[in-house]
Image (spheres, grey):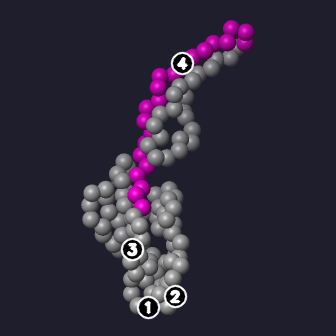
Amino acid sequence: MSQTTRGFTWTVPRFEGGSPIIDYRVSIGTKNGDFEDVESPVVGTRYKAESLIAGVTYRFRVRARNSFGYGDSSEVLSILCDEKPGIPSPPTTVFNSTSDNLTISWTEPNNKGSAITSYSI
């Protein structure tokens, strides 16, 4: 399985058990909790999780189903749900005496699981 934003993808099993895959069952659990199946089977090999709580680590696993039933579960994928970034360091300023330029810099904060895309000054 590979992680995308608040979701993940997986590949079709190498062996389908003699019958084509009908759908998949995704199970979700928290770091220390038991797994629960999501409400509906998933058609395709992509799942986007909804209503997750920022800062919580979720665990996911997937089972394929064919006309004979569900197969074994995949390995567990752990995803830390994105949250707002930390606070940047206080800015420092440098005034260039040979021009009218002012440079402001700071140390990038912890991104807490998601790339920082911009800053507001």
| Mark 2 Cα shell of 10 Å, populated few (<14), some (14-19), many (≥20) | few
Vertical side of 12 occupied by 76: above or below: above
The label nearer to you, 4 versus 3, is 3
The label nearer to you, 3 versus 2, is 3
Secondary structure found at label 1: loop
Residues 60 and 43: in front is: 60
Under mark 1, the amino acid is: Ser
| Mark 1 Cα shell of 10 Å, populated few (<14), some (14-19), many (≥20) | few
Q: Which residue is mark 3?
A: 73
The label nearer to you, 1 versus 3, is 3
Is residue 79 visible in this depiction of the protein? yes
Under mark 4, the amino acid is: Thr
| Mark 4 Cα shell of 10 Å, populated few (<14), some (14-19), many (≥20) | few
N-terminal label among 1 and 4: 1
**Alpha carbon of mark 3 to alpha carbon of mark 2: how far?**
17 Å
Mark 1 and mark 2 in contact? Answer it, CB < 8 Å. yes
